[in-house]
């Protein structure tokens, strides 16, 4: 048969434009479901919300706000405080813990307009399909030193971490460092509304050093800020890939390497149970996945 065209290399970050209002729609969803309130509690270290470094705990954020349905109040998300002992920052990941939350989150991403990004990457790089196998919020108020890290490595150029902002702080320095292809140039980029950064295989990036609010720092009077809600930054990242026999083992390893990994069984069988974009029919979406289903 004809030689299959190798997908273009994806060793750096792409800027993906999303439709106007995307960020606001997803932020509104996140506020309505209690996730932003959960962050306020976690990052101000309210009683019951102070986690040890690398610890995680499941919460029901829908119970923190009065805008949700009874079903929303039952949805469980987990919060994971990431390596705060090693790096002086208070990065917390928040992601779906149960199946209802996982599906709700994907539907909300689709409703906000995320499908256009997945379709764009799939078409641009000649994939057959894409599945968003992990997505999480990342929230932080302060950060002294942060690790340069590669999110996804060696998946045969078929994986992307698509990151976009929900809450940013006006007038701050660039908030994300992206290392360019020659690995010598580091470019500082601002998180912008309705713009996502898609980082591919070996997409190196790090959180900029920031100091917004440190609950342990008595030298600064946070009176006003704390009263009006501490200044927090929240971004969201979705890991989306064409998952096939060439990379399923690596991707399972990447997913399992993040603690905890409640949906590890999604990698048990190929083809994937859930597909969020497919070239053949074009009917698979985040809200209505194709595939064999759960």
Image: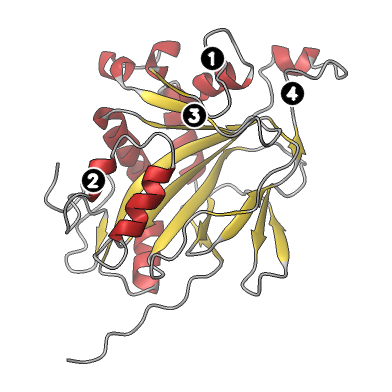
Question: Is residue 240 shown to the viewer in this render?
Answer: yes
Q: Which residue is mark 4?
A: 214
Q: Nearer the viewer, mark 4 or mark 2?
A: 2
Tell me the number on the disc at residue 30: none
The residue sitting at 52% across, 64% down in the picture is 202
Q: Determine the secondary structure under disc 2.
A: helix
Vertical placement of residue 26 versus 176, above or below: above
- Residue on which disc 1 sits: 49
Cα gap from disc 3 to disc 4, whole angstroms:
18 Å
Q: Quadrant of the C terminus?
A: top left
Tell me the CA gap for discs 3 and 1. 11 Å
For disc 3, the neighbor class at 10 Å (few under 14, some 14 to 19, many from 20) is: many
Question: Which residue corresponds to mark 3?
Answer: 80
Q: In this figure, which residue is indicated by the disc labeled 2?
A: 266
Instruction: State yes or no: discs 3 and 1 in contact (Cβ < 8 Å).
Output: no
Check disc 1 and report its element: helix, strand or loop. loop
**Location of residue 63 (image quadrant):** top left
Q: Which of the marked residues, 4 or 1, is nearer the chain's N terminus?
A: 1
Front-most of 58 and 122?
58
In the image, 13 versus 97, the foreground residue is: 97
Indicate whether 14 appears above or below 234: below
Residue at 44% in and 39% down: 136
Residue 212 at what x, y percent from top left?
74, 30
Q: Is residue 113 visible?
A: no
Q: Is residue 146 left or right of residue 135?
A: right
Q: Where is residue 198? Give x, y as percent.
A: 50, 59
**Is residue 168 positioned above or below 198 on the image?**
above
Looking at marks 4 and 2 on the same chain, the residue that comes earlier in the sequence is marked by 4
Q: Earlier in the sequence, mark 2 or mark 1?
A: 1
Q: Secondary structure at mark 3?
A: strand
């Amino acid at each position: 048969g004809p030689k299959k065209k190798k997908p273009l290399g994806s060793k750096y970050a792409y800027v993906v434009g999303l439709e106007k209002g995307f960020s606001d729609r997803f932020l509104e969803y996140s506020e309505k479901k209690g996730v932003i309130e959960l962050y306020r509690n976690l990052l101000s270290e309210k009683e019951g919300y102070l986690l040890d470094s690398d610890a995680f705990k499941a919460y029901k954020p829908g119970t923190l706000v009065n805008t949700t349905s009874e079903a929303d109040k039952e949805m469980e998300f987990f919060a994971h405080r990431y390596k705060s002992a090693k790096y002086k920052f208070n990065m917390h990941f928040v992601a779906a813990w149960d199946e209802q939350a996982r599906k709700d989150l994907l539907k909300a991403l689709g409703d906000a307009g995320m499908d256009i990004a997945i379709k764009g990457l799939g078409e641009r790089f000649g994939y057959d399909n894409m599945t968003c196998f992990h997505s999480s919020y990342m929230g932080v108020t302060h950060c002294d030193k942060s690790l340069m890290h590669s999110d996804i490595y060696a998946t045969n150029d078929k994986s992307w971490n698509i990151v976009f902002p929900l809450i940013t702080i006006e007038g701050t320095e660039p908030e994300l460092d992206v290392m360019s292809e020659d690995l010598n140039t580091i470019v500082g980029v601002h998180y912008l509304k309705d713009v996502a950064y898609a980082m591919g295989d070996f997409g190196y990036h790090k959180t900029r050093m920031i100091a917004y609010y440190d609950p342990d720092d008595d030298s600064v009077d946070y009176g006003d800020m704390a009263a009006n809600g501490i200044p927090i930054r929240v971004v969201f990242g979705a890991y989306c890939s064409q998952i096939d026999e060439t990379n399923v083992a690596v991707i399972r390893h990447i997913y399992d390497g993040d603690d905890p990994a409640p949906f590890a069984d999604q990698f048990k069988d190929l083809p994937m149970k859930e597909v969020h974009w497919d070239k053949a029919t074009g009917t698979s979406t985040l809200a209505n996945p194709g595939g064999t289903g759960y």
